[in-house]
Image: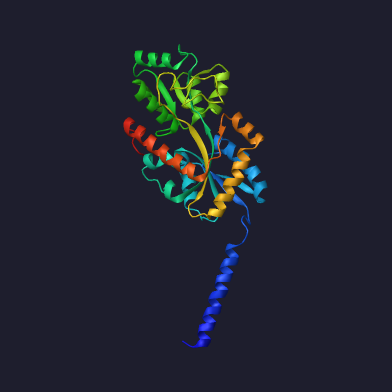
Amino acid sequence: MSTRRQALIALAAACAAGASGSAFAQPWPARPLRMVVPFPPGSSPDLIARILTEKLAAALGQPVVVENRPGAGGNIGTGMVARAAPDGYTLLFTINGPLVTAPTLSRNLNYDPFRQLAPVTLVATSPNVLVVDARLPVHNLREFVALARARPGELNYGSPGNGSASHLAMEQLKAMAGVDLQHVPYPGFPQITTAMVGGQVQAAFMVPAIAMPQVNAGKLRVLAVTTTGRTAVLPSVPTVAESGYAGFEAISWQAVLAPAGTPQAVIDRLYRELVAIIGSADVRDKMRAQYFVPAGTAPASLRQTMASEKARWDKVIRAAGVQPE
């Protein structure tokens, strides 16, 4: 090869490298971001996501647009983000279900949350609450279990579908308490609430934001929370564990993730900004008003949470004989 040709090739390579370096060095973000929420507008994840995105946009200097992509218990929107370009402009705000129970319970799941998603931060946690029809003659969990044992198979409980967090929490309680309750699936918590008020079902595990208005109205009665210790958002309500079932836990949580392969510098910046936002007094107050406990854990910690939660719920699923759909 001639010296002249070698020089031209070297020059072309240098120019290409320089152009690539310039493109890579472009400041992020250079355009609006989208935060995909795989649940409908007005849902609990949607409400918390909108609290965060308003402040995240100000911190990043670019709009952060909430994009609702509901369906299949959150799996549709989650899969969309898992397959999105890892360029830092598509984020996911979701709950635990699509990340830790969907891989076991969804027969045709088209994403792997552990391979295709990069954790950013655990935003907040929330207890679930065990609520019953206020007309039932029970005022605590022990009395409810005693009633269920006296009337095996006669009491119904509602959940938002097979394999939902609410369904699995009740299956866990059934196994630990040795009671027979009949599962009645509904499209969502509003329908469960209507059915409970109407007397079609007697019990359910719900998130407090949905349950407590009915509790305060005297239509439902709260018996226990599902955290291992009493929670600051409902300090007077005993836990399932302290009511006789040590080790019981069934919390809900919400997290931000990005497509796997998103540059680490972008993940780090998002984590720093989100932790600062979650730590601000007004955001913490808004979260607590929805019965959420602010978190803000590191990406590695969120990944550990995902792994440990999946292992724990896989055991519950196997023990209850819940089949994939």
Question: Which residue appears at 38% of the width and 14% of the height?
Answer: 146
Q: How many marks?
A: 0
The quarter of the picture where the C terminus appears is top left
Viewer-closest of 211 and 4: 4
Residue extending farthest to the top is 137
Residue 177 image offset from top left, x and y in percent = 36, 20
* Residue 306 found in image quarter: top left
The location of residue 288, given as percent across then percent down, is: 60, 30
The answer to whether residue 169 is left or right of residue 266 is: left
| Residue 196: % across, % down | 48, 21
Name the residue: 58% across, 48% down: 270
The answer to whether residue 216 is above or below residue 316 is above
Q: Nearer the viewer, residue 200 or 145?
A: 145
Above or below — where is 226 with respect to 296?
A: above
Residue 148, picture quadrant: top left
Residue 209 visible to the viewer:
yes
How far from the left and from the top, in percent, is residue 232? 56, 26
The residue that appears at 65% across and 50% down in the rendered structure is 60
Image side of residue 281 versus residue 242, left or right: right
